[in-house]
Amino acid sequence: MITYCSNCGNPTVTITPPGDDRLRQVCRDCDIIHYENPKVVVGCIPQWEEKILLCRRSIEPRYGRWTLPAGFLEIGETVAEGARRETIEEACARVDNLVAYALYNLSFIGQVYIMFLARLIDTDFKPGHESLSVELFNENEIPWDNLAFPVVEKTLKKYFKDRKIGTFPFFMGDISPL
Amino acid sequence: MITYCSNCGNPTVTITPPGDDRLRQVCRDCDIIHYENPKVVVGCIPQWEEKILLCRRSIEPRYGRWTLPAGFLEIGETVAEGARRETIEEACARVDNLVAYALYNLSFIGQVYIMFLARLIDTDFKPGHESLSVELFNENEIPWDNLAFPVVEKTLKKYFKDRKIGTFPFFMGDISPL
């Protein structure tokens, strides 16, 4: 929540700027509109033979639950570069052959997830600083009752469904509040 | 550029937080890291029979040049909803049948473009407040030398190429600095 101007430190006012139709935080001193926009989360499904890699979270929210490597896109990187970086950070794992697979809208929290299919280059992985452990799972070993987020569950269910058919068309979905 | 805390108005410091590897703006009073992340731009190719709709910009940058309807995604909307809204705002045009078509990384300016194919519902369009005019163009009428942005030119070139083949697979591309 913005209450002060990041450019001058004076309090902002909440108004609908001329020509706009939404309330914004505006600095009357700097004449700057401080827009707040959704953030992009990028991640991947690292594949190794029939298995996929999951990370057990060492941070809140969802401490101790399993997730796909994913995190906020940074300025200066492409979405694929961001997904690769997050996989290194959370699992010390290197992936290649990234193919865009899914886009999820989490519009209620202002996030857009972009998930890739990826090939794990080797099994020389270990927990990064946000993970308790990192493991490869066959489909019948996935900890469905202990996944961190609905977007992870949805992505994995779609993935195993598509894998049976043998094609992975790009798709879009929405995640609603629990 | 952030120089003051948006939460308390005190000056921020530029440091690499513990466990991070990038310089961030941090407020030592609030203990808040003010992350800056890429923004999502959403838009579409509105199709009407063999024609597509372009808008001539009435604002800078690129005043007077032609563009596809597109703009910043807002918190609370899906990427498709954002593309529909921008088409209404810039061209007073209603579209449906939105299909994700392209993702472009403009990583040098921290933007991710997501473009849809869409069907123009009717020809009852007119310039919105950011457009001088709005027109339908056949392929041979596209003002190639007067387009607003490289991302518009790339999207349209790919579109007409795909249209000759008759399939529009989702694709990703990068836009580099001019």
Image: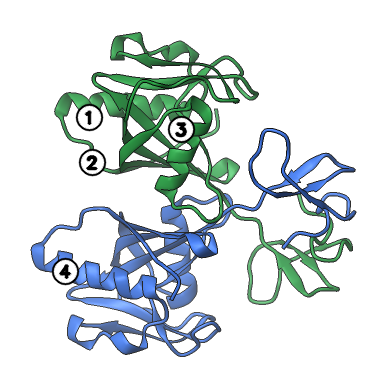
Chain colours: A blue, B green
Residue at mark 2: B169
Residue shown at the point (65%, 63%) measured from the top left: B22
Toward the viewer: B106 or B164?
B164
Give the alpha-carbon distance from disc 4 to disc 3, as whole Å. 35 Å
Residue at mark 4: A161
Q: Residues within 10 Å of mark 3 (few under 14, many from 20)?
A: many
Toward the viewer: B69 or A121?
B69
In the depicted structure, whether residue A59 falls above or below residue A15: below
Give the alpha-carbon distance from disc 1 to disc 2, as whole Å. 8 Å
Give left or right: position of A10 versus B169. Answer: right
Residue shown at the point (46%, 32%) measured from the top left: B87
Q: Residues within 10 Å of mark 2 (few under 14, many from 20)?
A: few
Decide: marks 1, 2 in contact (CB < 8 A)?
Answer: yes
The N terminus of chain A: image quadrant: bottom right
Give left or right: position of B17 versus A128. Answer: right
| Residue B160 percent location from the top left of the image | 27, 23
- What element does badge 1 sit on? helix
- What element does badge 2 sit on? loop
